[in-house]
């Protein structure tokens, strides 16, 4: 199988996989780049704290019963009026900013991740089908892609999100906000994956091993998934990582513009939009801390993506 | 070349027809235009008459053709929200967006090109590493966060620059410009800087990559051997050969900047097309949304086509390749 290495023909047990990872060029490159290690560490911490938000935050920021109005507008802990446990201060309703940020990061990360997975699934399948079969299917898929690429990314996402939200009954708006955003961000981003996979599928399908596989009647989907797809994974991996950062940014932008997550289940972008209203009242901590958290998440993802692109580029090695 | 030109133009026209179809679908399937336009007291007959007058009783295809014909002539109908001609609304806002994008582009070139050259020339120095890292930070900063932080620093804390609006403007014909008054220029600084941050890093990275390539070229070594000063070789000989891709990138990015200006315009309440669009989205003002979508896509498609055609004109190999690829597709 593909798991066999040149040096040690052992069964693919978990330990041997780990060992293989430890011996790989990618791991070596990772260890040689402090910025990549730093970014990965940062991302792990940010993701874990976000996912564990309900257990580590001092307050459930969306349980209205837990909010006390006399706790409102408390500045961060290091200023003279700061109060424990509100490390990063509270907003005008007495909501703990630190808790709100962790809950918000969870929403931002989940939406970003889900939209990348959706775009990958759609992009890879359509790209494989277009490249492998060619003909009119190829034409239709790639033309749709052309049209999508001829409109700015952010504009497509805003339109989809705005129109989907406006056409829903009021009761469903809040429940479906996250799925709508995931689709809105995935729609303009699948084309890139489809183009990459299509190009290599067109090259591979003419090669002898594919002809041979066809001759012995291997099913088309099996050829596509097991023979062609693995050959394209390197560029796809880099693109997916960088797009994860872009997806989180897009979600934040949409929520900031008011066409994303609603105020009762805020992502980081929503928190920044709400905090932006108090910019001139001197309550800077309501907007600055969510903004910093958002930048840290996107920065760590982009640094990993940058490193991955260089590490997997054979020309640079 | 003529065949290529025709093919690209046909392609662009097809894409625009598809975008128009999307806009039309939104227009059709979203709310009833009649209900949006009449007031409460309108009788059933009034409504039926308006419906007939707007041609809403015609077939789907007839309506689409009419939509495209009107759009080509710049007629996008009447705004649901304030009953004004959509094209007039957009034309009023166009100069504000255009000046913002123009100034942001200039900033990105003036700052991005030197930074790119420096990072390439001093490749392994601390300074270059620091600049490289800054550029990743620049890509990761959402433009609305940059805007908010700039407002917080320069308007709220220091009080140096205005945070909202466009300042005083001067009308030159139908074009209103803020570049001629002190308050107009002051109001432009923060939005333009915030819009250009992402673009600066793009230009910087591109110039760096291109410079690294040209620094390895023979003509650079010869120039050095001939005794041309290092500074002149870097900033004149090598840089000149990097500018073509930079110009291309700048041209193609203008469409993106116009689209992204809507975020900046929201942060700074800048009275441009983007702010108009976001307000239209909030009020589900479909004619304005459709018109904005088509206008921005049109600018996008035209710029891309110009770039493609220019490239094919400069480099005949591209012409042949695309022609062949086109033949195998069809």
Image (spheres, grey):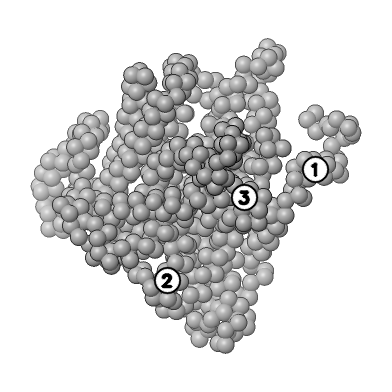
Q: Quick one: label 3, few (<14), some, or many (20+) residues within 10 Å? A: few
The numbered mark at residue B122 is: 3
Q: Nearer the viewer, mark 1 or mark 2?
A: 2
Residue A85 in sight in this render: yes
What chain does badge 3 belong to? B
Depth order, front residue of A277/A186: A277
Q: Are marks 1 and 3 on the same chain?
A: no
When the figure is inspected, residue A211 is found, relative to residue A309, above or below; the finding is: above
Q: Which residue is mark 1?
A: A21
B10 left or right of A283?
A: left
Q: Which residue is mark 2?
A: B154
Q: Nearer the viewer, mark 2 or mark 3?
A: 3
B58 left or right of B294?
A: left
x, y (%) of residue B269? 33, 63
The numbered mark at residue B293 is: none
Which element carries disc 3, helix, strand or loop? loop
x, y (%) of residue B57? 18, 37
- The single residue placed furthest to the bottom in the displayed view is A80
Q: Who's the residue at 23% across and 31% down the image?
A: B65
Q: Quadrant of the C terminus of chain A?
A: top right
Q: Quadrant of the N terminus of chain A?
A: top right
Disc 1 and disc 2: Cα gap in Å?
49 Å
Which element carries disc 2, helix, strand or loop? helix
Q: Who's the residue at 85% across and 30% down the image?
A: A6
Locate residue A50: give its quadrant: bottom right
When the figure is inspected, residue B211 is found, relative to residue B36, above or below; the finding is: above
Q: Who's the residue at 62% across and 19% down the image?
A: A205
């Amino acid at each position: 199988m593909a798991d066999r290495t040149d040096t040690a023909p052992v069964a693919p047990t978990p330990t041997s996989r780990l060992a293989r990872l430890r011996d790989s060029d990618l791991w070596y490159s990772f260890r040689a780049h402090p910025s990549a290690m730093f970014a990965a560490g940062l991302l792990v911490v940010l993701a874990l704290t976000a996912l564990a938000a309900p257990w580590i935050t001092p307050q459930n920021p969306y349980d209205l019963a837990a909010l006390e109005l006399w706790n409102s507008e408390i500045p961060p802990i290091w200023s003279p009026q700061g109060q424990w446990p509100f490390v990063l201060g509270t907003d005008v309703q007495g909501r703990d900013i630190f808790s709100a940020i962790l809950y918000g990061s969870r929403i931002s990360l989940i939406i970003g991740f889900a939209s990348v997975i959706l775009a990958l699934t759609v992009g890879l399948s359509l790209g494989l089908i277009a490249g492998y079969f060619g003909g009119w299917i190829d034409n239709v898929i790639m033309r749709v892609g052309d049209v999508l690429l001829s409109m700015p990314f952010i504009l497509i996402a805003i339109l989809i999100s705005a129109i989907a939200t406006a056409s829903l009954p009021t009761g469903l708006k809040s429940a479906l906000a996250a799925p709508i955003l995931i689709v809105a961000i995935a729609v303009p981003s699948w084309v890139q994956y489809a183009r990459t996979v299509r190009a290599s599928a067109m090259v591979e399908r003419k090669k002898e091993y594919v002809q041979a596989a066809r001759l012995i009647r291997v099913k088309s989907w099996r050829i596509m998934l097991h023979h062609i797809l693995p050959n394209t994974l390197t560029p796809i991996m880099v693109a997916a990582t960088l797009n994860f950062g872009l997806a989180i940014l897009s979600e934040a932008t949409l929520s900031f513009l008011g066409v994303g997550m609603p105020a009762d289940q805020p992502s980081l972008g929503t928190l920044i939009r709400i905090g932006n209203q108090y910019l001139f009242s001197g309550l800077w901590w309501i907007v600055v801390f969510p903004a910093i958290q958002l930048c840290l998440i996107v920065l760590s993802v982009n640094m990993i993506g940058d490193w991955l692109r260089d590490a997997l580029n054979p020309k640079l090695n | 070349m003529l065949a290529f030109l025709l093919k690209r133009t046909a392609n662009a026209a097809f894409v625009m027809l598809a975008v128009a179809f999307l806009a039309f679908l939104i227009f059709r399937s979203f709310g009833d235009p009649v209900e949006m336009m009449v007031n409460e007291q309108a009788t059933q007959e009034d409504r039926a008459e308006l419906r007939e007058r707007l041609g809403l009783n015609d077939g789907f295809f007839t309506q689409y053709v009419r939509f495209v014909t009107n759009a080509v002539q710049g007629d996008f109908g009447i705004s649901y929200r304030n009953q004004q001609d959509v094209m007039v609304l957009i034309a009023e806002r166009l100069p504000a967006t255009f000046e913002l994008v123009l100034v942001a582009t200039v900033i990105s070139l003036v700052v991005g090109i030197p930074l790119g050259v420096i990072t390439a020339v001093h490749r392994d120095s601390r300074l270059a590493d620091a600049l490289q890292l800054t550029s990743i930070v620049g890509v990761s900063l959402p433009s609305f966060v940059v805007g908010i932080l700039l407002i917080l620093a320069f308007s709220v804390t220091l009080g140096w620059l205005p945070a909202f609006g466009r300042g005083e403007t001067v009308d030159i014909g139908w074009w209103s410009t803020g570049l001629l008054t002190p308050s107009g220029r002051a109001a432009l600084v923060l939005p333009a800087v915030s819009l250009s941050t992402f673009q600066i890093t793009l230009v910087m990275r591109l110039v760096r990559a291109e410079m690294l390539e040209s620094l390895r070229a023979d003509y650079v070594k010869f120039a050095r051997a001939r005794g041309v000063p290092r500074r002149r070789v870097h900033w004149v000989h090598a840089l000149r050969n990097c500018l073509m891709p930079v110009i291309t990138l700048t041209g193609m990015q203008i469409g993106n900047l116009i689209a992204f200006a809507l975020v900046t315009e929201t942060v700074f309440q800048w009275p441009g097309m983007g702010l108009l669009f976001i307000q239209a989205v909030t009020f589900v003002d479909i004619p304005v949304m459709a018109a904005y979508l088509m206008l921005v896509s049109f600018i996008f498609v035209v710029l891309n086509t110009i770039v493609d055609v220019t490239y094919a004109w400069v480099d005949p190999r591209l012409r042949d390749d695309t022609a062949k690829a086109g033949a195998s597709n069809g």
